[in-house]
Amino acid sequence: MIPELGHYALVLALGLALIQSVAPVVGARRNDATLMQLANSTAVVQFIFVAISFAALTACYVRSDFSVATVYENSHSMMPLIYKFTSVWGNHEGSMLLWVLILAVFGAAVAAFGVNLPATLKALVLAVQSWIASAFYLFILFTSNPFLRLANPPFEGRDLNPILQDPGLAIHPPLLYLGYVGFSIAFSFAIAALIEGRIDAAWARWVRPWTLAAWMFLTAGIAMGSYWAYYTLGWGGFWFWDPVENASLMPWLAGTALLHSAVVMEKRNALKIWTILLAILAFSLSLIGTFLVRSGVLTSVHAFATDPTRGVFILAILLLFIGGGLTLFAWRAPMLKQGGLFAPISREGALVLNNLFLTTACATVFVGTLYPLALEALTGAKISVGGPFFNLTFVPLFVPLMFAMPFGPLLAWKRGDILGVAQRLTLAFAAAVVAICVTFAAMGVKSALAPLGVGLAFFVMAGAVVDICERSGLFRVPFKAALRRGFGLPRSAFGTATAHFGLGVTLLGIVFATTWGSERIVSLKPAQTVSISGYDLTFDGLVPRDGPNFRELAAKFTVREGGVPIGIMQPSKRSFPTRSMTTTEAALMTRGPSQLYLSLGDAEGDGSIAIRLYYKPLVMLTWLGAVIMALGGALSLSDRRLRVGAPKPAAKPAMQPAE
Amino acid sequence: MTRKQRRLVLIGVSLSVLGVAVALVLSALRDSIVFFNSPTDIVEKHVAPGTRIRLGGLVEDGSVRRGDNLRVSFKVTDGKTDIPVIYQGIVPDLFREGQGVVAEGIVEPGGTIKADTVLAKHDERYMPKEVVEALKKSGRWKEGNQDFAGDKK
């Protein structure tokens, strides 16, 4: 009964979405307030129905109802409760249901919180949102119904893919989807503006909080995914330039560009058409990401289900929305009123430079990800484009971007003074030079580029601090006055500085962990010791253990630093009988921001075991930086909400460098 | 600065960044991509020593030898040809004789592949797409064989 209820609720949601796709558009045409307002109620009720549907599927998993095909395929009665919840989206059908749930959440949020939106714009936005929703409801109901019943219910399920039996599954996909799907709002706003043929600075003010929220979740989601891959895959790497990772990086880059161009549009009423294009592109890249992952054109851990009909259906959705969006753009954009031009050396100019680098970097990732697919389709040759390609293309584009980053916020709107800004960044330059010298002195000249990377990271971090000091007038006006001014700064100023600081932190982590990490791959007998970067690990022996739905062989290691025991590490190999699969569970020991990383290879006949041992200096900063970036987004968002509640001309004086 | 000059600066900077990016992409595509080959391809195409390739196929039964210091040697076959591979390190959990494998590394003068990466299947139902292709080419592919059937349900 419960699965049928869920299925039925989803069909009702589709019905509502179809109504919401048409009625508000007609209402906006005829200026009929009742028809337009209909969208508010349908959006909220649609959310309720999708939530019921999702709850029904969750209930099937929690109750281990193996008469439902997806539950049988992806669950096991002995699984811990948390994995029964997470396996709801640990498979194709359920993850698509999560996708539409989040889409419905955003739709309802626009309906509920967009009180100050002009009626026609809001009606059109909700309608476009419903076009997307209808397409995905149809996709789920026709090709990926999660509620399909089995004629002869088996007694036991086939278990969730053991790689996915990890707390990471509870956090990573929902965060990532909140990001991906969040960009749908920016897309809907862009399409609505194109249909209306009207766009102004206020548009940017309405779009920015949604974009900011999506960006924040996407940032956290990517970082979480990277950390998960780091500790599950057992090679100690945190970014593999895997097509699926790239699929999440591309919308992030486009979304970051969108955030920045929307600022120009909001403050200076310029870059309007470009911003619209970015809004379309950011969501298009999210859709391409969904397509790449879900259609199975790529072989990857994420392609847990592949089926040609699904691929074709998603491709059709992709063509409809991306093609339709871009066609509409090409047709209507020339009719929109152009924004003004501005001096190259100005805050606007800096933000354009930011957009230029971000979108170009995004394009290189796009080429690297899709070139192998295109080449195979055209010539049949199979190639793999991996790390080296992206290190040669993406990195050289990101270096100048990060170097320019501290300059941007310090430049004045309209006409900036680059020398003046360079002067104010003296302290940041000094910090960078000191960092480079110290790194060279401490680490030697093993790698000439890495210390420069450290310098760049410090320049970015110090630049963010200088930005806040300059705005508050610290060191120039009396301390108390500076403090008062600091408190008076808009939160978005702190948001910007925090997010920029976070990127510096991430860079620092990446440079350290990839350059000065050490690695040992050895075979050890019990009581033997292996040393790495000042730590000694003694292999105490193998301990067999039983888990709820697996058996485990753990290896116990005592870790000593300078002869003093500091802890125990127990990496293990788990075997899951239901899927006859083995997974390797790495053991991590966090020492400040650095980590010891230990994973197991095969046990040999003579009682010895192969191990991979890494020392990863400052590796935690890589993810900490991303968390700081997301916090910056949250800070900025908390500021926006107040402003959006009472729209009035932007408080310009507060946004300019305080002088 | 006049309006025209401003526009020129904007266009100039954009074009130069794009130009640099295109140059980077083209040079990287020439130098850093890796071609995928089946064992038969390697023999037929006479891949030159020192080339970096990805080799896909099945680990030949009875060919796995383990040496000191985690050295492993094995042969990758597509049923027609087999190519010896040497690797030092920890092989993946699902690396087994008779199972699909993808090895990436340098072709040595004798025709051996010195691999620095060895990938195996993710789970018992999945086989790397490249391996499936290699087996199909050599006529060793059996439709409906669960072991070889990828993720089809």
Image (tube, rainbow, N blue to C red):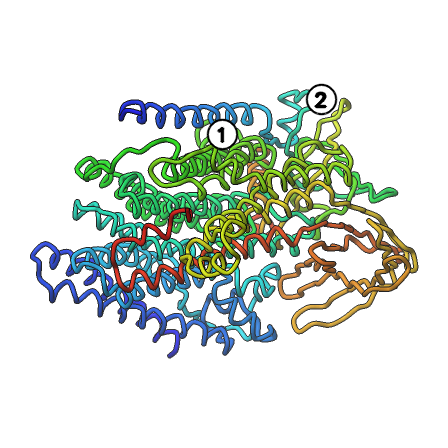
Residue B49: mark in rendering: 2
Residue A346 location (% of width, % of height): 38, 36
The residue nearer to you, when weighing A260 against B146, is A260
Q: Compared to B16, does A290 lie above or below?
A: below
Do circles 2 and 1 both sit on a common chain?
no
Residue located at (35% from left, 57% from top): A210
- Of all residues, the one furthest to the left in this rendering is A30
For label 1, count other residues whose C-alpha is less than 10 Å away and answer few (under 14), some (14-19) or many (20+): few
For label 2, count other residues whose C-alpha is less than 10 Å away and answer few (under 14), some (14-19) or many (20+): some
Q: Chain of mark 2?
A: B
Q: Is residue A303 visible?
A: no
The residue nearer to you, when weighing A123 against B53, is A123
Q: Secondary structure at mark 1?
A: loop
Q: Secondary structure at mark 2?
A: loop
What is the quadrant of residue B3 in the picture? top left
Task: Name which residue type carries label 2.
Answer: Pro
Q: Is residue A478 visible?
A: yes
Q: Nearer the viewer, mark 2 or mark 1?
A: 2
Q: Compared to B119, does A28 lie above or below?
A: below
Left or right for A371, reference B61: left
Task: Name which residue type carries label 1.
Answer: Gly
Residue A444 location (% of width, % of height): 78, 35
Residue A472 location (% of width, % of height): 47, 53
Residue tagged by mark 1? A380
The residue nearer to you, when weighing A304 against A241, is A241
Residue located at (65% from left, 26% from top): B42
Q: Chain of mark 1?
A: A
